Image (spheres, rainbow, N blue to C red):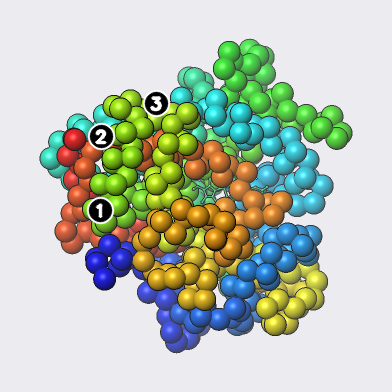
Amino acid sequence: MSVANHPVRVPLLDHDPGFFKSVANLQDNVLLAIPAQALEVPVFSGRTIVSWHMIMEPQAIKRILLDRLDDYPKSRTTKTLLGPAIGDSLFIAEGAHWRWQRRATAPAFSHRTVTSLAPVMSAAAEAACTRIAAAGVRAVDVAEEMTIATFDVIADVTFSGDDMMDRAAVHAAIDGYINEAGKVSVLDILGAPSWVPRLGRGPAMRLMTQTKKVADNAITRRRAKGAREIPDLLDMLLAAKDPKSGRSMSTAELRDNLLTFIVAGHETTAQTLAWALYLMGLDEDAQARARTEAQTALGGRVAGADDLEHLPFIRSIIDETLRLYPAGGMLSRTAMADDTLAGAQIRKGDTVMIPVYALGRHRDLWDEPDAFRPDRFADRKAIDRYAYLPFGDGPRVCIGASFALQEAVIILATLLSRFEFKAVKGRTPDPKMLITLRPQGGVWLTATPV
Ligand code: HEM
């Protein structure tokens, strides 16, 4: 087997390390909560402070995400962790409050709107090429570059051209919060009650509070000024009304949702691109094939929305990257009723997890599960829908999925059409998930213009 078929993995544990070691491990990498057996069995249950179940059986997952949605709301963990930063916004709201926000924001993510936002993505791709070219022969941390690129995109489509929004400050506040929250999230995962002090949230939260104020001011100014010529997401949400009730969003609701899009949409897409480039450094044949596809489709231009249909292999690379390194590597819910999932007894109050990372590498669901084989996505119908869940599924499926896929394909195709990327020896990234699955240590590549 070639080296390309050995992309780096999380060293899942095949023994119970004991409570204290578990806590230490989890603080470093949430995916270490997944036992190695999860790659072979349909369900794995355990107990730390609360009882928990990891579900890897596609039909049982469908039950959680679709058939019994109301019995499996997002877990307390997700809410305690993200609530202080993004309020009761689309990502964490439940019931009627979630439903109306989803209806109101849906048009901002329609196929038509996402297509109209492509020029922002093309501009970020072009800027990334300029930065990478400026590095010359020196190795570049493309993970860092992709974080800049996706932040440019999300900042432009949320608060475009708002000079009062200091992008660097917003970026720092959000990253600071996510890092702090990630470090202490382990207490939530273990089910510790909310009175347990979560050390470290103080300074990060203060910056977040400042950011909220800045965002509120930007929203108030836009409300007064009226929509921009080419409407951005803020304009769309300002105009949005619940088709059922006619209600529109308050400034606080608008701000929480825009911050949600920034939090949910930028690191996830950046990391997907970073992992895709890591895989390109590993598999030179796939990289060469992707480059030919990109150069043929683009002829030297930056990629745009119209090119997507001519870039099927690059899209498969993104799909396969999301199988091996799903940014949302673990989804969690709290059971509201007794149930049976894949033969396991679920009690009201139990934590139910869908370890998307393990699902994508499950021995019963995939051939050569740990190998990078983008062609497995050539025939999408052959893939069991509930075995591949990088964006979740059911009514709470990622609202930004097509936005993210379009952005990732535009940026990856443009980069591959312009540079040949080579891995730097001895600098393999370490897959670590706190809130999202990061390539710890960075993805260091040299980029030679072609
Ligand atoms: C590769 C990039 C992305 C990945 C892997 C990803 C993954 C996910 C996943 C797995 C969920 C479901 C979580 C759950 O069920 O517990 C989700 C939800 C969500 N995502 Fe994404 N996402 C990405 C990009 C984006 C972008 C670009 C945006 C917005 C601009 C976005 C906004 C959201 C929102 C608002 C939700 C909550 C939807 C709801 O509950 O109704 N995501 N995402």
N-terminal of the pair, mark 3 or mark 1, is 3
Which numbered disc, 1 or 2, marks the residue closer to the eye? Answer: 1
Identify residue type, mark 2: Arg
Label 1 crowd bin: few (<14), some (14–19), many (20+), radius 10 Å: few
Q: CA distance from mark 1 to mark 2?
A: 16 Å
Q: In the image shown, does 280 or 190 lie closer to the viewer?
A: 280
**In the picture provided, is 239 more to the left or to the right than 404?**
right
Residue 418, numbered label: 2
In the displayed structure, 47 sits above or below 151; it is below
The secondary structure type at the circle numbered 1 is helix
Specify the quadrant of the image occupied by residue 193.
bottom right
Q: Position of residue 196 (x, y in %)?
A: 60, 67
Which numbered disc, 3 or 2, marks the residue closer to the eye? Answer: 2
Q: Position of residue 114 (x, y in %)?
A: 56, 32
Residue at the image position 22 percent from the left and 46 percent from the top: 421
Identify residue type, mark 3: Ala
Residue at the image position 75 percent from the left and 46 percent from the top: 98
N-terminal of the pair, mark 1 or mark 2, is 1
Label 3 crowd bin: few (<14), some (14–19), many (20+), radius 10 Å: some
Q: Can residue 175 be spotted in the picture?
A: no
The secondary structure type at the circle numbered 2 is helix
The answer as to whether callout 2 falls within 8 Å of ligand 1 is no
Q: Which residue is mark 3?
A: 123
**In the picture provided, is 108 more to the left or to the right than 369?**
right
Q: CA distance from mark 3 to mark 2?
A: 15 Å
Q: CA distance from mark 3 to mark 1?
A: 28 Å
Q: How many marks?
A: 3
Residue at the image position 54 percent from the left and 29 percent from the top: 115
Q: Which residue is mark 1?
A: 285
Q: Position of residue 164 (x, y in %)?
A: 50, 21
Q: Can residue 38 be spotted in the picture?
A: yes
User: The N terminus is located in which quarter?
Assistant: bottom left
